[in-house]
Image (spheres, grey):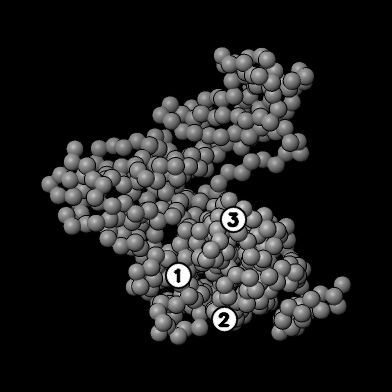
Amino acid sequence: MTRRLLRILAALGLAASLTTFSLPAHAEKRVALVIGNNDYKHVPKLLKAVNDARTMGDTLKQLGFSVMVAENQNRQQFSEALLAFDKAIEPGDTAFFFYAGHGFEIAGQNYLLPTDVPPATEGQEELVRDASILADRIVERLQNKKARTSILVFDACRNNPFERAGTRAVAGGGGLAPMVQLPEGVFSVFSAGPRQTALDRLSNDDANPNSVFTRTFAKQLLEPGDNLVQVAQRTRRLVSEMAETVKHKQVPVYFDQMVDDVFLGGAAKDAASVRPADPPPQKVAALPPVSVPRVPKEETTNAPIASFSRHNGGWSVVFSFADPTLGISWRMAGKGDFRETGFIDTLDPRTRKRMPNPSIELPPDAAAGTIEVRYVDQSGEMQGPFPIRFDPEAALIRDQRKILDMTSTSWLSFREFNGLLVYYTHLVSYRCAIREVRIGIDTAVPNQVLKMPNCDMRDPSAITAGMPLYMKLAPATQFVSVELTYRDGSVSEIKSFRAANRSNN
């Protein structure tokens, strides 16, 4: 097996890293796979992806990673590179995956294109899927290897590679889809935001061998004293500013589900060795960052799931069951008898009987705990109890974030009253889900913090007298850009609000 693995690595051009991987394994080592694809056979070739991979490989070696660099990979070689990467990772390791090349989004999923991806036209999405590497699958593989921290970086946000004159291309635009449902311990960075394309160069006179993103990101990784979030934030700002100089919108995005702060460049040895840091994020609420609650893992597929929503009177909890139910009962774990939820005035077409009420109410000050749920199945047998974890802090943040995502067009509104006012009442109403609000006035890059009132868990949506709800702008203001950093660490797409859409009421 060892000889076979060495042959695979040699075939991939990874011989330089063999000595590193032959060393005895030890806990929490750093392992990286870096792939750059230029020489596509059936879609447009790229100029800098291989250079980007080499630069990232050199950077990661300086950071103590054992690095495999693979270039111009066809489908089989790509799969073999991932297999070699799998074999190098042990539980507790830090795993880093970098890809530069063509990427393509189909139905919200991201695919990395090998060099032999076939030409595809309208209606041939399955051809692309079968010939490419699913990005989510790489995340799953790293989870299966029990890496403590998994970092994925994609410099693959380019135009639709399947567009050709005289044909209808596979449906899809530029850019990749956001990866917002990451498991714990995963951090991903994209060189551009949704529906944006990444610049290889700033002008015809730009002789830098690397893309705008990679040249910036690689440099920022080597700065001591910065954690990975700070590296991503600074990269985003610098790349955005450079792209704006050529009237292009490119705002790198990152998605953070890490457990710990990760300092790839190491902590600073002393204050004198560190350049002045960016101002710390504005603390806008009195809640610490929390993880998004996860559905309990049960052996049975019949276990219910629950959704939580906060309102003025307390909490509404709605249970969902895969099976038809004849009755539902619940209790807080270890507290008293089970209580029936009752019935609603609707017939269940599957049972031809009244449908059990799937919801319960909890008081606004309900403490964290476990809800035990039982149900009577269609045959009259009692199933459960099933434990459902209730964390009011995490549930509130998740519920408010969902509302903010669904109502993003309402984040800001304009009004003319003794000048131009911009209201952010909507953001204040759902402030408990927000770690930081950044805005940009007449710039596509949000560059200043908009302070939010503190979150009050007892009445999270309350707006009280004296709360700031608007700010005054110069009458000539054209637009305001907004970016939210949520409490789960992820970052929203940047939204722009034009001052022309204003009210005179």
* Snapshot quadrant of residue 89: bottom right
* Snapshot quadrant of residue 109: bottom right
- Can you give x and y, in whole percent of width and height, for residue 57 in the image? 61, 79
Q: In the rendered view, would you say 143 is above or below 457?
A: below
Q: Looking at the image, which residue is at 69% across and 62% down? A: 131
Q: Nearer the viewer, mark 3 or mark 1?
A: 3
Q: Which residue is mark 3?
A: 122
- Can you give x and y, in whole percent of width and height, for residue 113 in the image? 63, 66
Q: Looking at the image, which residue is at 64% across and 55% down? A: 124
In the rendered image, which quarter contains the N terminus?
A: bottom right
Q: Which residue is mark 1?
A: 235
Which mark sits nearer the N-terminus, 2 or 1? 2
Q: CA distance from mark 2 to mark 3?
A: 32 Å
Q: Secondary structure at mark 3?
A: loop
Which mark sits nearer the N-terminus, 2 or 3? 2
Relative depth, front residue between 419 and 197: 197
Q: In the rendered view, would you say 224 is above or below 337?
A: below
Q: CA distance from mark 2 to mark 1?
A: 19 Å
Q: Which mark is residue 329?
A: none
* Snapshot quadrant of residue 88: bottom right
Q: Badge 3: how crowded within 10 Å, few (<14), some, or many (20+)?
A: few
Q: Which residue is mark 2?
A: 51
- Identified by mark 3, the residue type is Glu
- Identified by mark 1, the residue type is Thr
Q: Secondary structure at mark 2?
A: helix
* Left or right side of 474 for 342: right
The answer to whether residue 186 shows anywhere in this view is no
- Identified by mark 2, the residue type is Asn
The answer to whether residue 395 shows anywhere in this view is yes
Q: In the rendered view, would you say 125 is above or below 315?
A: below
- Can you give x and y, in whole percent of width and height, for residue 296 in the image? 67, 40
- Can you give x and y, in whole percent of width and height, for residue 310 in the image? 46, 33
